[in-house]
Image (cartoon, rainbow, N blue to C red):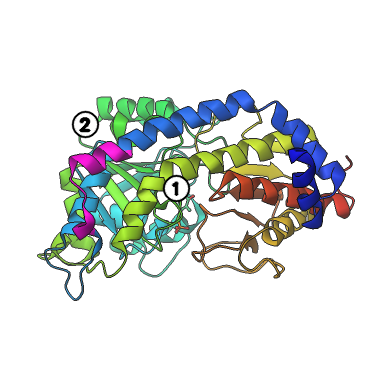
Amino acid sequence: MENQIIEELYREMGISGPVFRFGQQILRALEERFREIDGVAEYNQLKVVRAMQKNRVSAEHFSGSTGYGYNDSGRETLEKVYADTFHTEDALVRSQITCGTHALALALSANLRPGDELLSISGKPYDTLEEVIGIRPSRGSLAEYGIRYRQAELKEDGSFDFDAIKAALRPETKIAAIQRSKGYLTRPSLSVEQIGEAIRFVKDLRPDIIVMVDNCYGEFVDYTEPSDCGADMTVGSLIKNPGGGLAPMGGYIAGTRECVENCAVRLTSPGLGREVGASLNTLRSLYQGFFLAPTVTAGALKAAVFAANLYEQLGFKVVPGGAEKRNDIIQAVEFGFPEGVIRFCEGIQAAAPVDSYVTPEPWAMPGYDSDVIMAAGAFIQGSSIELSADGPIKPPYAVYFQGGLTWEHARYGILRSLQSLYEHGYVKL
Ligand SMILES: *Cc1c(COP(=O)(O)O)cnc(C)c1O
């Protein structure tokens, strides 16, 4: 009975019988996986609650400040909550950090000086960082300030290449950067365990090197974070996992007192540092979003696992594979032809609560070196903890899918993407 009325409503909302039933069949095999995901969420929920209790979060912390933002106890307490959750000495959590790229650019520029070298030990960094670093010449890049860059590639299987890392170290190497998530690549994302091993390796050789981890999309996916295994800075965006879908903007850097202090003076101004930065009316959503983040992330993980298994069953290459352990919430599906990416995104858009009536099209987005198509009908513009999909229109024509504020909505979105491919004859059921 229940199944019938649900199937009926799905049909009214554009999901045909064969697509619905195919989804049901995939889901039946995922019960155990979903239980594991719930276990991680439970643990992380406790971590967050404990940090909030320890710092005596109370209603007065939600009121926010204006102007200079001096004596903003809500902002200061939120930073302590982040630091305690990530088990770091300190954290900078600010609405003035505009996005993940900005948080990473801040962490780097605040802790590097002319003549220093930045070494990426996880191969090519996320596209937008190419301009931050100056890999692609860009106004204001680190390269313009005399900071050199090199990278140690990952091995064929996506794991760290310890020999290459050792060979790439120079006396000038000041920061070693690691990107946890694959971003727009089809390499596997790195586990916290692998990251910990790499950090130990670097620190054994050179204890003075600062290790920064780009933790975008990785927060609360596992029991531990990179900050639990030696990262000096763990960096991410609040319109991804840790914002829980409620944070309207912002970024965070959790790490050692020294590194975070450098970031604070760089973000505002030498001499002012963390003492300024009005929080306006944002604090309640940053707290509440952080509180919800473990379960929101769990929903997004279930969506990623569901999508992986569904498209793998249909014969497409998916990264990670349906049965693989998750290290972030991104799911890549390689279609091998542009129409696959476009139809998939069309389906995700059509399932959105906001802007469901628009049709996404590829465009030349700033910061990227090819046309990109993006599907998102989000409450917060560009928020990718909300159900979203994007892909550069270049080989191997992979779509990167992530988010979902609720698992139920994400499930509808994935079925809708399949419906779109099915209707255009790209898959047979
Ligand atoms: C999203 C992302 C970034 C950049 O974040 P924006 O908020 O889009 O600027 C950097 N690195 C990784 C791995 C990401 O996923």
Question: What is the three-letter code of the residue carrying label 1?
Answer: Asn
**Span colored in magenta:** 48-61
Q: Is residue 130 left or right of 287 when viewed as pictured?
A: right
Place of residue 219 in the rendered image (x, y in percent of width and height, measured from the top left): 41, 41
Q: Which residue is label 2 attached to?
A: 207
The front one of 236 and 370 is: 236
Q: Residues within 10 Å of mark 1 (few under 14, many from 20)?
A: many
Secondary structure state at the residue bearing disc 2: loop
The residue depicted at 46 percent of the width and 52 percent of the height is 240
Q: Which residue is mark 1?
A: 241
Mark 1 residue's CB less than 8 Å from ligand 1: no
* Residue under the point 41% across and 47% down: 292
Amino acid type of the residue that numbered disc 2 sits on in the rendered structure: Pro
x, y (%) of residue 94? Answer: 28, 60
> Can you see residue 413?
yes
Res 246 → quadrant:
bottom left
In 3D space, how far apart are the residues under numbered discs 1 and 2 (Cα atoms)? 31 Å
Looking at the figure, which quarter contains the N terminus? Answer: top right
Q: In the rendering, which numbered label is found on residue 401?
A: none
Which is more toward the observer, 43 or 218?
Answer: 43
Q: Is residue 114 visible?
A: no
